Image: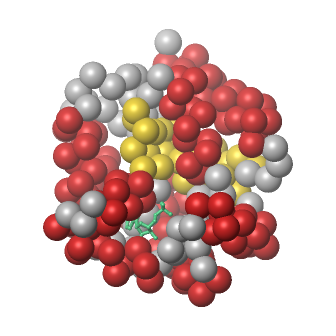
């Protein structure tokens, strides 16, 4: 059992690395952004509640996110471990996650922090806008999301560093190479230490 947080600003490559980690190590991928986008698309009650936050690039209130995340973990009783992608995004969420996991005899084992400069992030997000047509990948909303990251999410680096769980990874370069040469070895090392 290994539980990971994939951490980083919008455009750092969290989703891409999460997909590779999940399939290579046979883990369960939880992307709160994907969960919310699905709700919005299906126009569920949650979808209608969170839509305006997503469109504006603001964070969905902690209580809503924490409840959804708790339900997802509870449903996946047979998972070998989780890859948390886009969660936690506030200290409050991180504390709630630690509490939820410890109640199940689990913990976050490693936090992979993907690092990229702002110019690269904006460039990637604008390119993704053309490819995927995400509503929040416009210049204005991208700027807001980067702002929100700096103010509300970045303090988590210190939170996980204090717990000695943080591994910084250079998120610039070829996607496969980032996984093979940077992300995978860090996870393998943690697994080795566990055994
Ligand atoms: P993402 O796909 O991770 O970039 O998330 C897209 C949007 O979903 C964010 O801009 C937020 O509006 C919302 N969201 C996703 N995860 C969270 C979270 N952990 N806390 C609050 N809002 C979130």
Residue 188 spot, x, y in % from top left: 62, 23
Q: Is residue 144 above or below residue 194?
A: below
Q: What quarter of the picture does the N terminus occupy? A: top left
Relative depth, front residue between 176 and 146: 176
Q: Is residue 35 visible?
A: yes
Q: Which residue: 36% across, 36% down?
A: 107
Left/right of residue 105 with respect to residue 150 in the rendered view: left
Left/right of residue 70 with respect to residue 81 in the rendered view: left
Residue 66 spot, x, y in % from top left: 25, 58
Q: Name which quarter of the figure residue 61 lies in.
A: bottom left
Q: Is residue 64 visible?
A: no
Residue 42 spot, x, y in % from top left: 27, 60
Q: Is residue 116 above or below residue 189?
A: below
Q: Is residue 84 above or below residue 184?
A: below
Residue 111 spot, x, y in % from top left: 53, 45
Q: How is the image coloured?
A: secondary structure
Q: Name which quarter of the figure residue 60 lies in.
A: bottom left
Q: Which residue: 57% across, 32% down?
A: 21
């Amino acid at each position: 059992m290994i539980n990971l947080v994939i951490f980083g600003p919008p455009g750092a490559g969290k989703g891409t690395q999460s997909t590779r980690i999940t399939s290579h190590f046979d883990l369960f991928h939880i992307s709160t952004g994907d969960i919310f986008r699905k709700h919005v698309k299906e126009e569920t009650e949650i979808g209608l509640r969170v839509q305006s936050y997503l469109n504006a690039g603001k964070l969905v209130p902690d209580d809503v996110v924490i409840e959804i995340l708790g339900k997802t973990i509870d449903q996946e009783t047979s998972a070998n471990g989780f890859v948390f992608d886009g969660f936690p995004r506030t200290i409050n969420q991180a504390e709630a996650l630690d509490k939820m996991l410890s109640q199940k005899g689990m913990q976050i084992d490693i936090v992979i922090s993907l690092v990229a400069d702002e110019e690269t992030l904006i460039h990637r997000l604008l390119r993704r806008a053309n490819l995927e047509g995400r509503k929040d990948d416009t210049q204005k909303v991208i700027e807001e999301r980067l702002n929100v990251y700096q103010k509300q999410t970045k303090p988590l680096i210190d939170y996980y560093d204090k717990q000695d769980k943080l591994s910084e990874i250079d998120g610039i370069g070829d996607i496969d190479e980032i996984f093979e040469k940077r992300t995978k070895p860090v996870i393998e090392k943690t697994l080795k230490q566990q055994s």
